[in-house]
Amino acid sequence: MTALTVPARPEDARLRPVPWRRMAWVTWRQHRIALAGVAALLGALAVYLWVTGLHVHHAYAAVAACHPASSNTCATLTVNFNNANGSTAELIAALLQGAPALIGAFVGAPVLARELETGTFRYAWTQGFGRWRWTLAKLVPLAIAVAAAAGAFSLLLSWYYAPFFADGNQTPLASTVFDLRGVAFAAWTLAAFAIGALAGMLIRRVVPAIAATLAATAGLGLVTGLYLREHYVTALVTSNPNVPGSTMGSNVFVSDPAWILSEQWQTKAGRPVSESALGQVLPAQLGGKGGGIPQSFEVTDYLTRHGYTLWTTYQPASRFWPFQWIEGGWLLALSVLLIAATVWLVRRRAA
Amino acid sequence: MTIDKGIGAPDGAGGASPASGGGVGAPGGGSRGSGSPIEFRLDAASGVPTYLQLVHQVEHALRLGYLKPGDQLPKVRDVVASLAINPNTVLKAYKELETKGLAAGRPGQGTFVQATLSQVALPELTALRRSLLGWLATADAAGLDEDGIAALFTNTLRDFRDRRRGSARPAGGGTEGVA
Amino acid sequence: MNMNVVEASGLGKRYGRTWALRACTLAVPAGHVAALVGPNGAGKTTLLNLAVGLVTPSAGAVTVLGGRPPGSPAALDGIAFVAQDTPVYKNLSAADMLHLTLNLNRRFDRRYAETRLGELGIPLRRKAGRLSGGQQAQLALTMALARRPKLLVLDEPVAMLDPVARHDFMAIVLMAAADDGVSVLLSSHVLAELERVADYLILLSRGRVQVAGEVDDLLAGHRLLTGPAAEADRYAERPVVHLRRAAAQAHLLVRAGADDPVPPGWEAHPVGLEELALAYLREPGAAALPGPARGRALPAETGEPSEVR
């Protein structure tokens, strides 16, 4: 009759599948609002971080230029710097903890949930493209897009937080900042997206799927930060109290402090001692006999000379990148698994 | 008579479709390009099968002179477009007309009127009319009302047709056709 | 084209403990407009969903387009489906929807689609969500037909349309059947307009197929006998589908042809499609199922046409 786009003989026993690249426009057109939202959010945050970060770096330049670093003047400068900028940095870090979950939920959950909720899957999954290929062709590019955007953004975050590691304020492995930098931020965004996609397929309604994704991602993040991460590599245990960054030692304000997991005093015989017991032992001028034990090198020195040993369990800051790869690795594996499960579900049972 | 060779667009160029965005529908707009002197209509509530309605309309048009031998019957596509009926129904009607010898299909061109219904001359018609009036007067005097007369006539006509076709059907329709 | 567009054998679908469709055996020949009729909840949507591959069977099997599995590339390619309430992406314009369908299929006649939308007066740039119900239905139908399918499946396509929109919608569907030989399978719970449109009937009731066959054959194979109520039971051994009785008079819907003898004192009338369907729906135990499948496209050789009272 009139011109056709692709003449084909439908009698072909083995039909060539519709090319994957056809879905590029489809995915873009249907999800451009979500993607634009992510871009706008990250863009606005980036602008803010850039402006604030410049200020922070400018202030830090003065601190860094101070010599010698261990002198009291320089220490005071450091403390002042941290007081002035630290709380903002902490607030930003706290808020940004939720960013991967938000991005993943709002981009990932509606992909399938909206189709199922509005009934448009009855159109989409009866077209020639085929429904599991359609799902895969949407999820993979979107996953890569959000992960890439998050990854780029986390470079800016690393730059922003650099001064606070350099002046010993924070350990790079701290839960509040670890997942904002390196590959973790991108990996968490990817995982949240994958959770969102599966939630969308299982729950079939957009708003509940988003809520479930946020909850699941937050839960996973909490579990990782509180319990899982410190076990990636067996922690080091030392009786040397001068662990970098430990307030019990002499290395308090050093760059890239370690992540102190626990500090435990033990008697000469190896029995653990409680703080109140130690309080009895300390002379009055060191704050003993009631009141907390001041975290100071003098106390440590005194107790060590009297036969007590401080056992510190910690992860050195040098393990930052190994930890990043481990966390990124299992999050990537989880994401792949979840997306594969979603595609499998689509293929097996639709309506 | 000249055959109306289609004033409008030939079949297949997207013509003759009822235009409607959700409101006004063009009344079976086939006159633009169907090339046939007649249009079909459909009485959905009449209880008469659709294809028979089409057959009757062609016969009626022949009788009244709207259609003459050589004229084209409406194209199947146009009938479907304006009446929204199954195309096989139209085909069935046209096949019935072929069986009756009234129309013939030309491959690739359509269906054309072939013969005409036997015409009865006017004086004969007048005579028939008069004798019918007489019969009606008799029936009325016997006490039959209008519906009774119509039922009796229909049943007898059916018997007459059956007898003429030589069918072995037993007296279908019964003695007392009036329910 | 002698294949069966939909073939089902013992097909069943269960949701939880309820069987939405059960023991469904069908063979719908190509080249027909098949109507799937039944009350709400009879299983029509389930059957259609099974045929287009949106749902997998709990029992039995279904194949389409001459033996292919639903959901296979060949089936997806050759079947176009318009679901109930004609879902469209509300935020996409009609032009976007065309582009979408173009990208998702092997075959798409863009010029046909744009021409058809232009004739219908549907603006290409307007978002689909802001079109009227009739326009959305026409848009969905246009996209389906532009794919040049072999089988068009419609689930209650005209339920939400006003009479004019309904007429125009069905006219386009039937024109596609006339022009391109598209087979049509559509479901409806409105009987009145089916006789004009359908030449194959499937009657579903409570998840089971009661009637399946060509409309011509069905109508030729049933008669309505009217006669004295007292004699009604004498003919009970005939294949009586439905009996309606008053004090003096009874109507029997029987499976009989035009040539079958009529008992003396009784009248025989042909039956319309709506009356036939209603009678079967009132008798859940009755069924009129065909023999081996035949794939004819043309109307049957006519005997004498049914007499009409």
Image (cartoon, coloured by chain):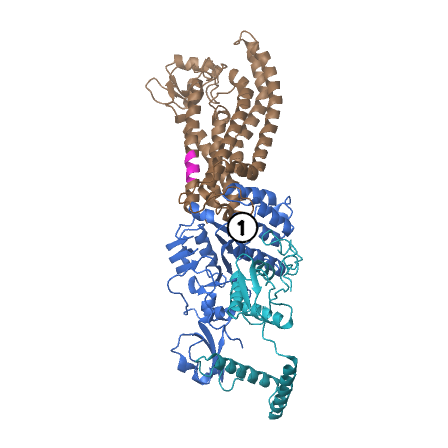
Chain colours: A brown, B cyan, C blue
Q: Residue furthest top?
A: A68
Tally of numbered discs: 1
Magenta stretch encompasses residue C74: no
Question: Can you say whether A40 is above or below C149 in the image?
Answer: above
Q: Main secondary structure of the magenta part?
A: helix
Q: Is residue B80 left or right of residue A340?
A: right
Query: Residue A11 appears at what percent x and percent y?
Result: 42, 47
Magenta stretch encompasses residue A339: yes
Q: Residue furthest bottom?
A: B142
In the image shown, does A8 or A165 lie closer to the viewer?
A8
* Magenta span of residues: A336-341
Q: Residue furthest left?
A: A269
Residue at 59% from the left image edge and 13% from the top image edge: A61
Query: Residue A211 appears at what percent x and percent y?
Result: 52, 41
Mark 1 lies on a secondary structure that is helix
In the image shown, does C122 or B5 lie closer to the viewer?
B5
Q: Is residue A37 left or right of residue A250?
A: right
Q: Residues within 10 Å of mark 1 (few under 14, many from 20)?
A: many
* Viewer can see residue A106: no
Query: Residue C31 appears at what percent x and percent y?
Result: 47, 57
Query: Residue B66 appears at what percent x and percent y?
Result: 64, 68
Residue that badge 1 annotates = C145
Chain containing the residue with disc 1: C
Query: Which kind of residue does numbered mark 1 sit on?
Result: Leu
Residue at 45% from the left image edge and 51% from the top image edge: C52
* Viewer can see residue C134: yes
In the image shown, does A192 or A266 lie closer to the viewer?
A192
Q: Is residue A146 left or right of residue A261?
A: right
In the image shown, does C180 or C270 lie closer to the viewer?
C180
